Amino acid sequence: MSHDGKLNNASAVLFGRDLYYYPQCLLRMARFKGTTKNEFIDNQRVIGNIYALLDAAMAFFFKHLSLSGKIEGLYREEELEIPYKALRECCTNAFCHRLYHRPGSSVGIAIYDDRVEIENSGTFPPNITMEKLLSGHNSEPQNLIIANVLYKSEVLENWGRGIELMISECRRVNIPDPEFHTDGNSVWVIFRYIRKTMEYDPTATRQLPDSCPTATPQVEKVLHAIKEQTLSTKEIMGMLGLKDKSNFLELYLYPATRQNLVEPIYPDNPKHPRQKYRLTEKGINLIKNN
């Protein structure tokens, strides 16, 4: 992704590390007390590339939304109050389709007792009405290079299916359909939910400390399952009592590898038939200090 031998802005947004000169690569996250912005419980700002921001966003959801589990046969299935896939798809779209040429712009996540709001700078394509948006449409990404990379790396859903996925995921757990809004300068999505009473669970895995702010309880479970061993996907899932491979990869393994806590033994061939995973030095140090 270069032009005349120079990396373009899309490459920085996707893969950049030192983004001091890209202040618009900002994610704002807040957990408010109650249903207004009068008082917040948690307030964070993160600057980074899209993958780092997506991990930070999902970690923030896991920190502030209740995670419940139900037993399906011999296995425990975990579910956020708002489905993980719906939130992840919404955030991915916000990072992918937003306007990056405004230096003061950002993506914002606000969590209240009754809803989650995700907003970004930009607007819907001019020929896409709200009716067409909700009934299915051809995707017209604002940032074609970014959209292509996210699609090929399997982060972005098939073009034009993201909204359908968000709606179907919310209906699956019997919460209201997400609401889509724009004022011509920004786009925001509202997920409404009924907050579950959070009780103390002595068996629950605690959140990792602020020294690793993008980690989730699921990532910590992977680290403690592997420890000094080298294990396959199936072996890790068996130790954690999980059966849904797609959810395991999205919630547990991929975040751990993206944060360089876990590494594959065949990094150049992700689908190697004998692929296994082990902790990196960073992962080993992290569980030693907890």
Image (tube, helix red, strand yellow):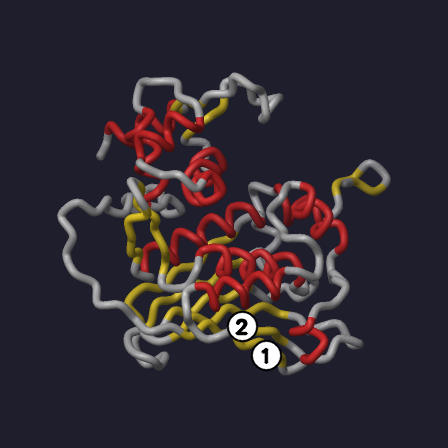
Position of 253 with respect to 290 (left or right) is right
In front of the other: 273 or 35: 273
- Place residue 39 in its image quadrant: bottom left
Residue at (63, 53) in percent of width and height:
157
- Looking at the image, is 183 positioned above or below residue 70? below
Q: CA distance from mark 2 to mark 1?
A: 6 Å
Q: Would you name the residue on which mark 1 appears? A: 181
Residue at (51, 73) in percent of width and height:
178
Q: Could you tell me residue 97's position as x and y percent?
A: 67, 62
Q: Could you tell me residue 289's position as x and y percent?
A: 23, 31
- For the C terminus, the quadrant is top left
- The answer to whether mark 2 and mark 1 are in CB contact below 8 A is yes
- Looking at the image, is 76 positioned above or below residue 193? above
Residue at (35, 46) in percent of width and height:
216
- Place residue 259 in its image quadrant: top left
Image mark count: 2
Q: Amino acid at mark 1?
A: His
Q: Residue furthest right?
A: 4
Q: Would you name the residue on which mark 2 appears? A: 189
Is disc 1 surrounded by few (<14), some (14 to 19) or many (20+) residues within 10 Å?
A: some
In front of the other: 282 or 161: 161
Q: Amino acid at mark 2?
A: Val
Residue at (68, 47) in percent of width and height:
151
Is disc 2 surrounded by few (<14), some (14 to 19) or many (20+) residues within 10 Å?
A: many
Q: Which mark is residue 12?
A: none
Q: Say which element carries label 1.
A: strand
- For the N terminus, the quadrant is top right
Q: Could you tell me residue 264's position as x and y percent?
A: 49, 23
- Looking at the image, is 140 positioned above or below residue 289? below
Q: Which circle's residue, 2 or 1, is located before the other in the chain?
A: 1
Q: Say which element carries label 2.
A: strand
